[in-house]
Amino acid sequence: MDESDALIRPVNRTTLPQEIVRALTNLIMKGVWKPGDLIPSEKELAARFQVGRSTIREAVKSLAVLGVLEARAGEGSFVQAPTSELLSGAFRWGVLLSERNLDDFVDVRVLVEIECTRRAAERRTAALIDQLSASLEEMAAHQTNHETFMESDTRFHMTIAGAARNPIFETIGSTIQSIVRIWYPKTYYLPETKSRTLAEHRVIVDAIDAGDGERAARAMHEHLMAAGHRLRRVLSSDMDLTA
């Protein structure tokens, strides 16, 4: 029997890729899979977890975004050696995030993204507004496609981080979005999530376009707190189901 057999078991909720992320994480943290190892194929993992291949694909993509796995065309996905304390910490934080420390994550996200938004408004350009508007259009057009909606959402936030014109803000913003990509899609099963996210984003863009840094910062704060509240609702519901 392969040592990983004890750690790869069917999960209860096939619509939640983070359950797969958690299981794959255990394999890496316990040293069953080591840096440089080729992990099982998407097809094999789907069969062993008894979930759809799209669920495996989303989980593996999330770990690739975090720098935990490296996808090589034609070869598969390999475990990466840790290269950054920032990413290593974000990796553990993202995997272990729960209702208990969600407030801490939202607190850090607010501090970083509000300042980026304020600076984006103060340094706005026509090109920036065009990029943000394009992200809004993509989100509006793909509200039934979770993956495409998430990609547009991520691009929206990273565009604002880049507009702050500080590479460290951009790096931290990228790490934050890596965690967001793992956890916040859980809220997509709340009927109002996408429409409200889109409406909240529009308010942010309007304030940035007006060059009003304080209004833009307030709009981003309201958006992040609302998004955190939506995730808290889902996490609380999950805890009630497993209690």
Image (cartoon, grey):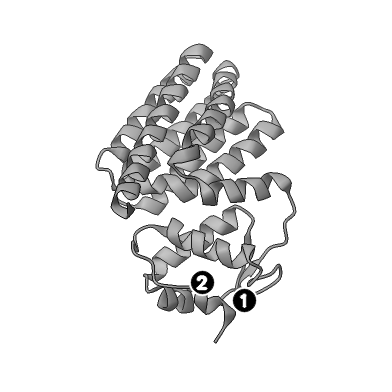
Q: Residue at x 45, y 77 (%)?
A: 43
Q: Residue furthest right?
A: 83
Task: Please indicate whether residue 46 sits to the left or right of residue 194 in the image.
Answer: right
Residue 174: x and y, percent? 60, 41
> Is residue 136 or residue 93 the one in the foreground?
93
Q: Is residue 41 visible?
A: no
SS assignment at label 1: loop
Residue found at x 60% / y 28%? 163
Crowd around label 2: few <14 · some 14–19 · many ≥20 (10 Å):
some
Above-or-below relation of 219 to 106:
above
Instruction: Relative to 84, say whether 61 is above or below.
Output: below
Q: Secondary structure beneath disc 2?
A: loop
Marks 2 and 1 sit apart, C-alpha to C-alpha, by: 24 Å
Marks 2 and 1, the one that precedes in the sequence:
2
In the picture as drawn, the residue positioned furthest to the left comes out as: 191
- What residue do we see at 63% from left, 75% from top? 38
Q: Nearer the viewer, mark 2 or mark 1?
A: 2
Quadrant in the rendering for residue 39:
bottom right
Position of residue 43 relative to residue 35, above or below, is below
Q: Looking at the rendering, which quadrant does residue 109 occupy?
A: top right
Residue where numbered disc 2 is placed: 7
- Label 1 environment density (alpha carbons within 10 Å; few <14, some 14–19, many ≥20): few
Residue 106: percent from left, percent from top: 50, 32
Q: In the rendered image, which quarter is residue 169 located in?
A: top right
Q: Amino acid at mark 2?
A: Leu
Q: How many marks?
A: 2
Question: Residue 37, how many percent across, how many down?
Answer: 67, 73
- Tag on residue 75? 1
Specify whether 147 is left or right of 96: left
Name the kind of residue labelled 1 in the image.
Glu
Say if residue 218 shows up in the picture.
Answer: yes
